[in-house]
Every structure is written in structure tokens, then in C-alpha cells.
Amino acid sequence: SALVQNGPAPQVYALDFAGRGLAMLEPLPNVGAVVSGDEHERVVRLFRTIQDEIESRAIRFAQVRAGTLSEYRRDPGGDPDLPRIILMIDSFGGFSDAFDRIEAGKWLDLVPRLLSDGRQVGVHLVMTGNRRSTFPMAIAGSVPRHLVQRLANEDEYTSAGVPKNMLTSTSPPGRGSLDELEVQFAVLGGRPDGDAQATAVDQLAELLRRNDAVEAPPIGVLPEELNLDSLPAGTDSTASVVFGMADATLGPTDVPIDSHLMISGPRQSGRSTTLATLANRIHDLGHADMHFVSARAVSLGGASWWNNVGMGEEDAANIIRDLTTEFEIEPPPRPQYLFIDDLTELLETDADFAMVDLMRLARSHPIYVIAATESAVARRAYGNAIPDLRDNKRGILLAPDPDFDGDLLGVVLPRTGPPVWPPGRGYVVNRGAFGLVQVAFPDHL
């Protein structure tokens, strides 16, 4: 109740790289998220959210010439209800170990910048470590206050600036040194056991909501399943189509369709259904002819919108040859899309060889190939159609192996991705740029 009476409650976000002890805070309305260390996507999204908020506040503060959050709240052009934001990192050592090699340590290197840039705009960090050396100098030197509690090594007290004999191995839990004063932390609920504290937090959360406490914005996650009908119909251009949800924004995202596309992934990763999604969206544009080939009979070949269908090696080769011959004689008046389900099953067949001629013609005609391939096989394919697809450097890498599959489209993927790759989860790649996405699947063809 004190938080409600004394102004806007700070919004709290927590990264738990310790024993998940912070999870009990999630019921509180002003706690936006408690993210565990193994939730890689949410950890990165939380850092992005905090970074974006700091940059946004810096612009708003500059517009009214405010140097601090207090000044901004008092200014007639400011916002008196703008809350402080507190980012807690429980076990900085655990965070450092987990993210030191992810994206070349990008998120670890961001912490000192958040400390220096966030303080003036009301964004603050609270971090824990089991020893003083856990924090590098770039961080330790930027933190104005240090709370020292009982340490495993008594020699560290002196280097931490704790007065002699203030803390010892027999000091009770919650005892510490702050600004050279001995302090004892209070426990919500008055009892140290976890169940009692969790019950007290639940009661506090209920009280705050009865007092109309403002809810902190949550840190969401990509859905494991996404229906194509839930997304906007398309973009303002015929050069791209909306096909899924982006991890960076948790909003609709598009993929370019004015060039060839490779859709790669292991079995059961959603390659064929992704092909169906793109076919649905391109058909909805109504500006192109669409053709389909596959090494075997598949349900996608039964869709009503195909101008030509070839299922089986011989039929596929004939369709591709006929298209090449037709367009050599008379260039197509509108875009032509050739969809291929599992191109790797057609490698070294007549259809594969025919693809080389069609893709050569595509360099000067609006002919685009959208092909699904098995990633492990595509990595070993050095002749015929697949190298041409790879050279285009556009496509979707589903459930990729971070050490190898980025090479298919010329990118270096993060070494750590989702712990589980649901069907349709992967990276959309556009000539060097890439982002994590969840592909939306149609209910029917």
C-alpha cells in the first residue's frame, strides 16, 4: 500500500540465474516478468525492452530539458506518473557464464551501458553475486552503492570495504553492510521459509490490485502455434507477404517474395507447411501464376490455385522443362512462382538438371523459385539448383543447427536458440539480416 500512496510503483523485471527463488514475485502487479536463465528468447527480449525504454526516455527527457526522473515528473511537459524501472539480475555470475559466448557476448556487454545510461532516466539495476570478483571493473565501478552480505571467503570483506569484524561466518541470513552501516533485511511475512514469503507476496498482490495498482507490461514469448488467419492479410506491396510473428516485436512480420527463397530444416520442422503458408499468401495477392512440383504425391499438390502440378521425378522434370521452353520463347507477362516440396529428394535427377536452365532464365525474367529442402542434405549439395538458391541468401532456416545451418544463407546464427524448436520456429534471413520468427500455418490448403 505504501507504493500506491507514495506515487507510481516502480516496474520490476527480474532475470533469475540462481535457484528460481524470485518466481514468487510474479503475482505482484508491478512485476512485469521473472525470467529464468534458460528462457533465452525472453532474456534477450527483456534486454531489448529495457534498452529501447532507456533510449525513448532519453529523447523525452531532452525535449523538456529534464536531467532526472524527478525533474521530468515535475515538468508541465513531462509525465508525473512515469515509473522507475528496476531490472534485477540474480546471480550475475550465472548470467555471465550463460551469455558470455552468445552473440559474441553482446548482451553481457550491454549491462555497463544500461547502468550508465539508465540511471538519469529512472532505470536502475540490482545485481547479486557470490563474491566481489564476480563483477568486472566496468560494472563494479559504475554501481554507486554496494550491499555486502556474508561471504564464503573472509579475506574478501577487506577488499569489499566492510569494517573489520562486522560480518563473519556466523552472521545470520540477511545481515549485511551498507555504506559502512550494519543492516538487517526484513522478511515479508516475518518468516524466512519460502512458503510463508510466497503467501505474503500473494496477499500483498491482492491488496495492491484492490487499490488499483498499475500493471507492469509483461515480457511475452512467441507462441508455439500460430494460425495464418490471425495475421493481417498482407503488406502494401507485392514484393513481400506477411507470414508469421517476429520475436523482436511479437508482431506480424513479412518475407520478401521478389526473389528465390530457400526453406530449410530437419524433418518435422514444418518445411512443407511453411511452403503452404507462402503459397496461400502469394495466391491471395492475385498477381502471379503458381506452379508446384514434388518428388512424390503430397497434399499441397491438391490445392486449387496451381497452374501446373508435377508429382514424381518425371512429371516434375517435364513441368520445369516446359516452363523454361515457354518463357524462352515468350517472356512471362506477370510473376511466375515455382514451388518445390523437398528439393533434396530431386537432387541429381532430371528435374534438378532442368532447374539449372530455369534459374538461369530467372536472372532476366520474373521467375521465382521457393523450395523446401532438408538442411543436412542441402549443406552437402555443391552442384545444380541448391547452390543457386543459397547464393540468393534469402530464406527461412527452421530449427537450425547454429553451428552449420547459417552457412546455407551466409549468416552466423546465435549459438544458443530456443531449448525446443516447435514446428515453424526458425530464422528468416534477408541477405545478411536475420531474425527469429514463428511461421503461421493455414487451417487448410
Image (cartoon, helix red, strand yellow):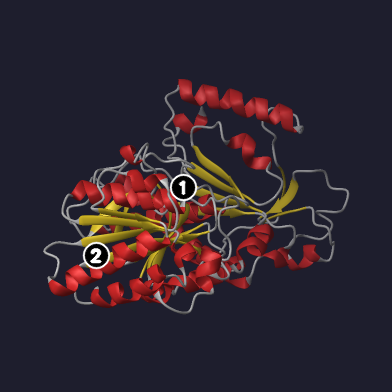
Image point 34% across, 71% down: which residue? 355
Q: Position of residue 276 (x, y in %)?
A: 36, 48
In depth, the one of 269 and 19 nearer the eye is: 269
- Which residue was labeled with disc 2? 258
Q: Is residue 189 left or right of residue 14?
A: right
In depth, the one of 182 and 421 nearer the eye is: 421
Image point 65% across, 56% down: which residue? 179
Q: Amino acid at mark 1?
A: Ile
In depth, the one of 178 and 18 nearer the eye is: 18
In depth, the one of 428 and 200 nearer the eye is: 428
Residue 27 visible in the picture: yes
74 to 161, vertically: above or below = above
Q: Secondary structure at mark 1?
A: strand
Q: Position of residue 85 (x, y in %)?
A: 46, 47
Say how many tags the image has. 2
Q: Position of residue 347 (x, y in %)?
A: 46, 69
- Which residue was labeled with disc 1? 85
Q: Quadrant of the C terminus?
A: top left
- Measured Cα–Cα span from mark 1 to mark 2: 43 Å
User: Which quadrant of the structure image shows residue 442?
Assistant: top left
Image point 17% across, 53% down: which residue? 236
